[in-house]
Image (cartoon, rainbow, N blue to C red):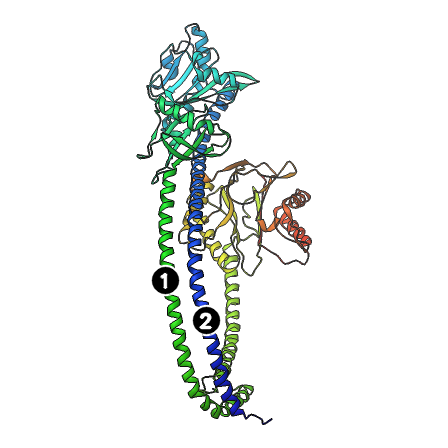
Amino acid sequence: MKKMSLRNRILFYFLIVPFCAFLITGISTVIDMYKLQYFASKTGSSIAKEATQESILIMEKEIHAELMMLADGQATICHLQIERMLSAIKDMSDLYKSVVSGEYRFSKRVLEGETYNQMLKDDFTYVSHPSTLTQAEVKKGLSKLVMTRNAFKYFCAYDDYYTGMGIALPNGLFFKYDWFPIPLDYDVKKLDWFKTAIAKKGKIAWFNPTLSPSNNKLSLTFSQAVMINNKVKAVIMIDVLPQTISNDFVVTRGTDCFAFLVAPSGDVVASEDSITKKLNWRLSVQEKLEFKKNIMTKISRNKKTSFITTFKGQRLDVAFSPVTNTKWGVGVATPLKSIHSAAGQAVTKIKEKEKFYIVSTKKHIKERIFIYMAIAFIASIIILFIAGWTALKLGKPIKQLEYGVKQLGQRKLNEKINIKSNDEFQELGETFNTMAVELDKQIKSLTNNIILQERAKNEFLIAAEIQQAMLPDVSMPFPEHDEFDIYAEMHPAKEVGGDFYDFFFVDEKHLFFSIGDISGKGLSAALFMMRSLTLLRHEAEDGFAPDEILVNVGNELEHNNEPCMFFTGTCGMLDISSGEIALSNGGHPPPFLRHNDKFEEIETKNGIIVGALPLKLEQFAITKLKLKKGDTLFFYTDGVTEAFNSKGEEYMTKRLRTTLQKLNGANPREILEGVSKSIKKFIENSPQSDDITMMTIKYYG
């Protein structure tokens, strides 16, 4: 068989094979496109129907979830308001117990011969008692009751929600601070708040809003019996405006939903108007019956409940959430017609989109078929013209490629292979050119990376030096003070750490101290740490309390904080003359206190993280301690308890407590050195996973 020349083979492959391929591919593509058109039309209709049904279900679920979220949110707000009132009545109960026990009394108070007005001294304090009580019994009882006057006055004068506070003895003697007078023969023994509180023996008694007998205004009353040795010694009562619970009852504004409030009695005592969004506390008898019949019968009082019911002639989706630790509850309802209306609009849009996409698909497929046939025809013509030329010129690009490869082997990276054959040879030549350019870039990039790494290393070293310079000197921080000793250490996990500590005197006898853990590690954490430390110092020097310092610093850091960086930390103020210390915690591990030769964790009232979110003062609290001679405080970051060994085990708080107990009686520096040795022994050769920072204060008095 006669051999086919290379030129003829090239002509054959360029002409016959592509022609057959174009022909077969073109016919099959046209057939497939028409099938695709039919399939797209049918599938689009089916998907549209399914999407319509699913959109209605999803919309109902989302609205139902939003209702429950609204109810939960308002229940949380109500819980905070109720906790504030419970705190007030507890404070008054504790005050009266201290009066009865003799811990609290007026100095040189003589009641003999004084009139009621002389004893009360206030236009807003009133007394009532049964006519059966003698003058001596009244004065004897008032000698203790009158001592609560200043506390009553404080609550009522500085809180607009409290309209009156009173305390009654079991014999009916009643002492009250109120904006309006009460009758002298006002018999509390006949009132529900008095009888119910005695029956409950120390538990809170709630009552539905009623008209106050002193000012004829709607008032919410709750009471509690003061128990001493399991005996009722008095009953504390507080009148508050109903708005105390519902002041922030604005969860449905901007919607057609409405909310309602359920009292401990199980009655709906207030309902939000769906149009004006104002809370109505004076529900008609008909409205209360409607609520009780169609809503309250379907609610489980002590757990979240959701259901669909008919109310005032329309179908409603209702969500109910109980207020934590109380028998109050909040409900939110929305008309189902609103859900269906929104779903109907979604269905209309889906159908319009379906029609548009089907028409667009048909048009697009026809255009693709025409374009493909045109391209195939033009390509066939072009192939006929370039096939012969390519066969003749095939040898030239091969030699050019050979030359280019040799130049590349000699590292002459600027040499270019210039092939204009519009085929694989040109692509291969361009690939060689691209490879040479990329290789040249890689060499330059490697050189630049080495330079940048050296520069970054120097920057890290400078940042570390700056960071260490900002931390206070722990060698001998305050040699002129022998009332206390303090020592701190920070071991960063990287070249630059994110933890910090600080201590300095804000005046002659008050030492401010802080310790914190920045989110993240490395240079960004170090820069954030420097800013946080500067702000803490500034706020402390301005005389703010620890909780105010954390709030002010957090709100300042939150501005322009796009990475949402934050820190957890503890700061405090130590009076070195008395040993009194005030701590405030922002989401940080609680410190340990050595007292009576034993280390125990301090139960601090934790706040939240500082820097990522806007903060309010009520989110933080102050823990007060009084250190005695020899007492020691140990502060640390979570890098201590979360240190890992090679087995993946954590150091844990329990192991830290054991280590501290072994160091009982040591000075601050010895304690930190002992804990550091214990951690190193535990992790062995494992890399340090987080910054480790510790600070110890020992009080000598």
Closest to the observer, 681 or 227: 227
Mark 1 vs 2, N-terminal side? 2
Q: Which mark is residue 29?
A: 2
Quarter of the figure with the C terminus:
top right
Q: Which residue lies furthest to the bottom in this view?
A: 2
* Crowd around label 1: few <14 · some 14–19 · many ≥20 (10 Å): few
User: Is residue 454 rendered to the left or right of residue 183?
Assistant: right
Name the amino acid, label 2: Thr
User: Is residue 139 rendered to the left or right of residue 493?
Assistant: left
Residue 372 percent across, percent down from the top left: 41, 74
Name the amino acid, label 1: Ser
487 over 450 or under it: above or below: above
User: Is residue 268 rendered to the left or right of residue 692?
Assistant: left
From where the camera sits, is residue 370 visible? yes
Closest to the observer, 521 or 699: 521
Residue 335 percent across, percent down from the top left: 37, 36
The residue at which mark 1 appears reads as 360
> Does dot 2 land on a helix, a strand or a loop?
helix
Residue 35 percent across, percent down from the top left: 45, 65
User: Which tag is nearer the camera, tag 1 or tag 2?
Assistant: 2
Quarter of the figure with the N terminus:
bottom right
* Crowd around label 2: few <14 · some 14–19 · many ≥20 (10 Å): some
Per the model, the C-alpha gap separating discs 1 and 2 is: 19 Å
